Image: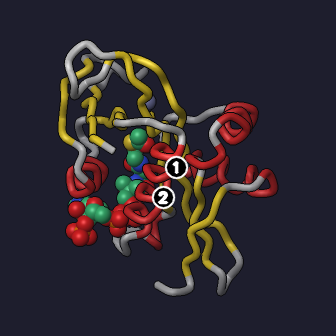
Amino acid sequence: MEQIHIRPFQPEDLQRVVSINRTCLPENYPGLFFMSLYESFPKAFIVAEDIETNTLIGYVMGRIERGFSSLKGYKLTKKGHIVSIAIIEKYRRKGIATRLLEAALEGFREYGASESFLEVRESNIEAVNLYQKIGYVEKKVLPGYYRDGEDALLFTCPL
Ligand code: ACO
Ligand code: ZN
């Protein structure tokens, strides 16, 4: 897929990213939320663009949080939280989410994070497989985490 470029999010991309998020996921956010992540952690907000058609086809966004390490006992550390990732349907299973995540994890490293974490619906097999393939490991179940009552799986990964 040479015609897919991976690049940092730019403010002009906002409406398209909001629309991909609404099309692909039940967890939606106001535009200002996307912009505040971009302003605080631009290296962890990455988009994929089809340069043949000039359209955005996916995004990943994240933020740095401080908290206890999931990997090294009760040590306070910087952790890169993958907040949301989605690829529009017709571009799936071509390795694009993998490329986006790798770029976001590199951004987390540049911010000094030593591990990453994320939550995912337990029924979301595609995403669970993606995270496991990249090196995330299931840490625990978060019962009733989603608004509809579904459990989340908390995944963590060293950076
Ligand atoms: N069935 C089984 N495994 C899958 C599937 C699938 N349909 N799709 C991806 N995977 C796994 C495979 O292990 C795959 O490796 P392989 O193709 O070598 O077998 C691996 O993930 C990597 O696949 P990619 O091609 O990089 O993933 P893709 O670009 O298709 O995007 C994603 C995966 C983001 C989960 C996509 O299906 C999507 O947008 N889904 C809807 C939105 C969503 O669920 N986002 C995650 C929510 S959780 C969160 O945001 C923190
Ligand atoms: Zn989260």
Q: Find residue 103 and name its label.
A: 2
Residue located at (30% from left, 16% from top): 75
Question: Residue 32, percent across and down?
Answer: 75, 32
User: Across the whole image, how many numbered discs are drawn on residues?
Assistant: 2
Q: Is residue 47 above or below residue 95?
A: above
**Residue at mark 1: C-beta within 8 A of ligand 1:** no
Does the CB distance between marks 2 and 1 fall below 8 Å? yes
Q: Find residue 107 and name its label.
A: 1
Question: Residue 139, percent across and down?
Answer: 19, 29
Q: Amino acid at mark 2?
A: Ala
Q: Quadrant of the C terminus?
A: top left
Mark 1 burial class by Cα count in 10 Å: few <14, some 14-19, many 20+: many
Colour option used: secondary structure
* Residue found at the far right of this picture: 12
Mark 2 burial class by Cα count in 10 Å: few <14, some 14-19, many 20+: many
Classify mark 2: helix, strand or loop.
Answer: helix
> Where in the image, quadrant-wise, is ligand 1 located?
bottom left
